[in-house]
Amino acid sequence: MQNNFEKQVQQKMDELRFEPTPPVWQKVALQIQTEKKRRRFFIWLPILTLLTAGGIWWVVQLENSPIARATSAHQANGVQPKKTAETVLPSETVDQFSSQENVIPKKINQLPLKNAIAQKTNEPVAEPKTSIEKSEPGKENAQIQDGQSVSTSPGLMPGAGGTVQRKTVEKRNATQRLADNVAVKNSVTDGGGAIEKQLETVTDKRLETLAAKNLETDADKRIETAPDKQMIVAAIPETAIKKVNPVTLGDNPSTKIKLVPRSSSEGAQQKPVEPIIKKPALKDTTVVLKIASAIQPDTTAAVQPTVMIQLPGKNKWQLQVNAAAGISGLSHGINLFGGLFSGEKSMADATAFATPGSAPPTARRAPSTIRNGFAFSIGASAEKKISRRLSFSAGLQYNYYSTSLVVGQLTRQDSVVRNSLQLNQFYANSGAGFSNKTNSYHFISLPMSLNWQVNKKLPLYLKTGFSLQQMVAANAVLYDAGSNIYYTDNNALNKTQTFLHTAITWRVVNKKKFSMHIGPQLQYGISQLEKNKSGNHLFAASIGTQISFSGK
Amino acid sequence: MDYHNLVKDCLKAKPSAQKQLYDCFAAAMLPVCYRYTKCMPDAEDVLQEGFVKVFRSLHQFKFEGELGGWIRRIMVTTAINFLKRNARYQTDLLFPDEHLHAVSNDQHPEVKMEAKELADLIRQLPPGYQTIFNLYAVEGYNHTEIGKILGIREGTSRSQYARARALLMQWIEQKNNDIKKAVYAK
């Protein structure tokens, strides 16, 4: 119902044009690009995960190769490796092998591997270049000098607006470089005493004085010598400084605006925004405040900017069925990835039942390595939405883990191990007739997880949580170094275990009644497998699938 | 102008197309934001927020209406949301419940002034009047729609508009007189 006055005003307003300042577009472009980069990252994430999983698998395979096994045996006894992994070791070496304290540093351990490979290919072995070279005094100094020259470069400081940030970053870099160099020092000091002394003089003084002192003061100087200190202030948005002009009421003094207190006006006069309950395709109930629905009077193409408010209490539990299959193994201590990558462990490490005082035989077969075995899990859980992208799930699951090792013939004979445990049968670790034996562990678990949808537009989910697992059965043999036998004793195992798990899943099917997720998952037992504090933890890496039923 | 290809390129996230779209509409949309806010930096903030929304929801534009009109509606919605969440504008959105809405169609002054001057006059309207006047007179919403947008009664919207209109007409008349005097003085 517009008349001429409104038409004139409308016409005048349509004529109006203002050119926005350039920063407006820069901010818009920045926001759009950030979203685009974030989207790209999440697209690449599953691919990277698959590549990582493939890499892990490849490393595990590589570690299981004959060369790696030969190298492992060589590391244990300090002599040239023989062609088979089942090397006969001297008795003293077995004790060293079973001792957890005599672990050879990894960086030094890489050398025998090179030697072994070189000998196989008849190629000359290069001079050992360990991390010792990295900590040569001259080179360290050069590194630090480089760091200084970079940080003092005036070209890096176009304006003093970011000086404070840069200073922080540089300080952090200096600290990082210092930490790196100290790490180099530490890695070398593990190797030997002479080198340790040499490096103490080099690293402790020089690194701390040169790296920290010079780099820290550098940023301070730059702030003081900044050409225009006002530029620092210029970083503050103009809107934050500018005061708002008071609104004039015009020339008519009689015009008074009656301001009604918000509390009274809202209830009595302002009709609250009408909530419209939507029934979306997905399972959650959402209340949509259609603030702008009335802004589209005539065209149907108009967007409806809405404010979505989740009411978490109205979501129902959803039933899920989970299944996963993969590999499992033993990891020593918290070195999960060491355990994952190695793929196998020495049985001597796996059990600490070696009798300390008993005199071992003069020469005997080394305990078998423990290899990764098959693992699977199956179960059901209930999931409840906490927010639009976050949900909690809890359920019941059966988990099977296994490892494998090589044992001798089963001998039925009364024997005593660990001074008190009486056995009537055991597997020998000597003689002939060796065969593969699978150690299997059966658990019933109560997993609890948080599931987070990484991006609302992508069906990518991160899942993390823990599970309480109760061992219901086990068929595992343990090694006794004193008797050089493998025996079964389930009482020596921790029956109740706590596992941490994490998974990345991709929703591959999203039907009305059910949806399916697939992705890699990792489980790690934070409880030790054995009661004797051997430091062995079960882990499993698997590919899992999860089917959620919406119940509609 | 056919914006089909431009929109398609924007949907492919081509930076050049996005910049072109912005250049096409920014100058026309900034006055829309300007009329709802109290200062130009605020108007630019609204413009920026509005364009981010435009690019985010461009896939919803089905070419059933004019692209300019669609963007304009987003800008208006963004401006109102900006007023609602910004403390400085809270009082602008408190509307007393009045029942005075006699809008006469007779004897309105002719709008002779420049567009910028008129926009500044609208921006000088008292809190509440400005938003309702903009929505009704300039954007073309009816009072029912305005009531829904602002969460007020239709009658309140009518009475507020009537007051705003009367006040603005009075100011325009004064401006016209000033212009006349200036002409006679010459």
Image: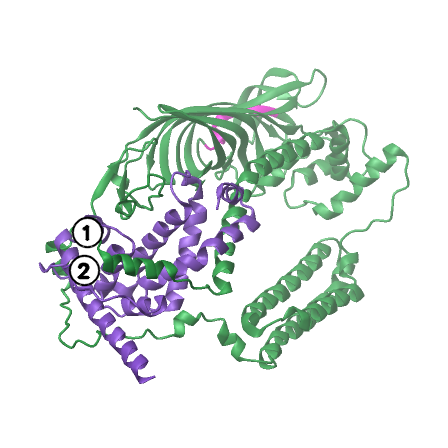
Chain colours: A green, B purple
For image coordinates 88% across by 33% down, the residue present is A121
Q: Is residue A354 visible?
A: no
Could you tell me how many numbered marks the image carries? 2
Mark 1 secondary-structure assignment = helix
For image coordinates 44% across by 44% down, the residue present is B58
Q: Is residue B28 visible?
A: yes
Q: Are marks 2 and 1 in contact (CB under 8 Å)?
A: yes
For image coordinates 17% across by 54% down, the residue present is B152
Q: Position of residue A130 (x, y in %)?
A: 78, 51
Q: Position of residue A350 (x, y in %)?
A: 60, 34
Q: Is residue A193 magenta?
A: no
For image coordinates 53% across by 45% down, the residue present is B13
Q: Position of residue A178 (x, y in %)?
A: 65, 64
The magenta stretch spans which residues?
A486-494
Which residue carries the number 2 mark?
B161
Apparent side of residue B81 relative to residue A355 in the rendered image (left or right): left
